[in-house]
Image (cartoon, helix red, strand yellow):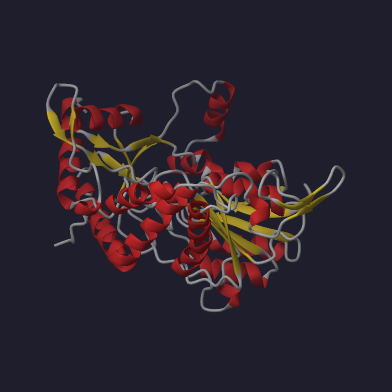
Amino acid sequence: MLANYRNLFLGLDEAIKLNNGRWTKYVNFDNAATTPPFRCVLENIRDFAPCYSSVHRGAGVKSEICSSLYENGREVILKFFNASSLKYDVIFVKNTTEGINKLACRLIGSKRDKVLSTLMEHHSNDLPWRERCDLDYVNIDSKGKLDLDNLEEKLHKGRGEIKFLTLTGASNVTGYINDIHGIARLCHNHGAKIIVDGAQLVPHKTINLQGGNEEESIDFLVFSAHKMYAPFGTGVIIAKKDSFVDGMPECRGGGTVKVVTLDKVIWDEEPFKDEAGTPNIMGVVALLSAIRQINYIGMSNIEMVERELTQYLLNNLKRLDYINVYGSEDFEEDRLGIVTLNMRGLYHEILSEELSKKYGISVRNGCFCAQPYAQRLLGIDKSEIDRYVKNPDLKKPGMVRASFGLYNTLEEINTFIEALERIYKSNGL
């Protein structure tokens, strides 16, 4: 029996109205996009609201409370990742996308700078680099896993020239987890630094930023609070100390300087230099509340629940011969609670709509902001891709994704399987 964590959340048991007028309990299998809030997060926001004030901007008592919580929050975050403030800085941003864009702006000095990415990336860890540097991609295998031999080959060939490898900690399409510490060791041995897009990985797996030794340590980690049960729009960059000593911030203004005259600017130290404007203190309150709750539950318990859910779904899908699962059809330890599929003979958008409107099951369909990766998994050739480039409004191939949070249940998976069976029959497929 899996532990039931549903009482820790708000809104999970709200009934929704279907197209036929019937009311049913909502099933949320779209956690890879955004997660519902912990109850305690909203309670802490409510309790903190009377103290809401400016951060780093005033001498009033409320401002001091907010500033203290904001600064202490950096230590809470570093402790969550077993990292030390002597080695790392914490920079608050809006989300992972903004964080990676900031890294691309601040770390790249020339179009000649060589950076490696991979073919399994979310657009947010691909597009920010394209126009700024000499970008190359590490290949994937037939199932969508990173080709480590190809990675090592490229690092060896570009030894001393490749500055960064920027890769996802876990795919938002297949759920495959990359061995970030083994890859970090490989990068460091070839003179490169590693940037980890942790948007999918952080809420579901324990991350030790420092690894087993310095060679295995992560240089940069970026993640979002909205995928770890904390709304209000906060993201975080964790960067090794002195990563941004040189250069000016790409976003400039209040809070980034020590001295300004009409002809001179003396920039502040990190992390303040890269946190322009009034900080999102409520977002930080939400994130810290979520971290406390996750620590209380225990990441090992979260992993166990999501592993059982994923294995249960995959085992049940095997008996539906009209369902195609992308990546591996079997449960593997190096994957998160993400299962991406298609139903034979039914367009992915129609399947997603029927699941929602007829059965109250929320999934995601499309290419999940990872079009090059999805195109590889779907086996779309270049001539077909060119058709969509010439006419972007054409209906595009895609998939349907079910992604789990720690509150999902086996009963919800049974509902999902039954819905798939009914949809297949009702469409005469």
Seen from the viewer's position, the closer of residues 99 and 306 is 99
Residue drawn at (34%, 46%), measured in percent from left and top? 35
User: Which quadrant does the N terminus fall into?
Assistant: bottom left
User: Which quadrant does the C terminus fall into?
Assistant: top left
Residue 83 visible in the shown view: yes
Quarter where residue 246 is shown: bottom right
Q: Is residue 303 above or below residue 129?
A: below
Quarter where residue 243 is shown: bottom right
Quarter where residue 250 is shown: top right
356 sits to left or right of 45: left
Seen from the viewer's position, the closer of residues 189 and 125 is 125
Q: Is residue 231 above or below residue 65?
A: above
Residue projecting furthest to the front: 60
Residue projecting furthest to the right: 263
Could you tell me residue 284's position as x and y percent? Answer: 46, 52
Could you tell me residue 162's position as x and y percent? Answer: 71, 60
Residue drawn at (48%, 65%), measured in percent from left and top? 179
Could you tell me residue 101's position as x and y percent? Answer: 62, 45
Could you tell me residue 154's position as x and y percent? Answer: 66, 60
Residue 174 visible in the shown view: no
